[in-house]
Structure formats: C-alpha cells, structure tokens
Amino acid sequence: MIVLDPVLAVISVALNLYWFVVIISVVLSWLVQFNVVNTSNQFVSMIGEFTWRATEPALRPIRRFVPNLGGIDISPVVLLLAIFFLQQVITNIRVSLRVGAF
C-alpha cells in the first residue's frame, strides 16, 4: 500500500495535465474555425498538431458512440467528464488508503 498512494498521485497529475491539453485543443480548434489564428503560423501549427495527436486517440472511440449533433462535437465534453470521474475515483481510493492506514 505504500507504493500505491504515490502511483495514484502521479496518475492524478497526469489526468490534470491531460485535462488542460483537451481544453487547449478545443479552444484552438474554435480559434482556427473562426479565423482568429492561422494554421500557416508554424507555432500554431505545432500546438495544433500536438494537441490533435494527444487527444484524437481518446476522442475517436467516443465519437463512435456519441450521436452527430449537426456539426457540434461533444466528444471532448464526454472525455472531460470521464477524466473528472476517474479523478474522483482516484481521490476516493487515496482517502480510503489513508484512513485504513491508521
């Protein structure tokens, strides 16, 4: 049990970082769609490519099950809810480990 708490802490931090990558991906896609930023800019292109490669493997299976809402993609919302759920499960496990240790 001594090893499990730090492992869960690292997983929780990784989920937090991934949460921000998903948010950045969504905001960047909106900015590109509304022509606020241009993908011909190398920096914007690099960030877009990174966020797409980081989020697409998780979003693709969700898109298969989420119905098409006429151009509105709610798969990032489903992914963020899943991340939130996992974070709560990890928090509950960590709390139960601490309570059980005493």
Image (tube, rainbow, N blue to C red):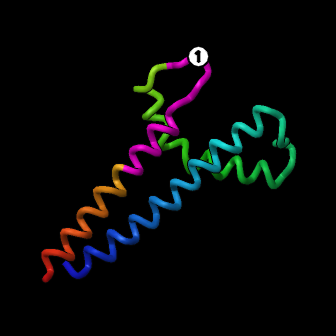
Q: Residue 22 magenta-drawn? A: no
- Residue under the image location 63 percent in, 46 percent down: 25
Dot 1: what SS?
loop
- Residue under the image location 19 percent in, 68 percent down: 96
Q: In this view, which residue lies farthest toward the top?
A: 70
Instruction: Report how many numbered discs are placed on residues in the image.
Output: 1
At label 1, which amino acid type do we have? Gly
Q: Position of residue 58 (x, y in %)?
A: 47, 43
- Residue under the image location 76 percent in, 40 percent down: 31
Dot 1 crowding, Cα within 10 Å, few <14, some 14–19, many 20+: few
Residue 53 horizontal side relative to residue 60, left or right = right
Residue 30's place in the image compared with 94, above or below, is: above
- Which quadrant does the N terminus fall into? bottom left
Residue range corresponding to the magenta coloring: 68-84
Read off the residue under disc 1: 70
Residue 55's place in the image compared with 8, above or below, is: above
- Residue under the image location 26 percent in, 79 percent down: 3
Where, by quadrant of the figure, is residue 56 drawn? top right
Q: Position of residue 84 (x, y in %)?
A: 40, 51
Residue 25's place in the image compared with 98, above or below, is: above
Residue 22 horizontal side relative to residue 58, left or right = right
- Which quadrant does the C terminus fall into? bottom left
Residue 3 horizontal side relative to residue 72, left or right = left
Q: Nearer the viewer, residue 46 or 19?
A: 19
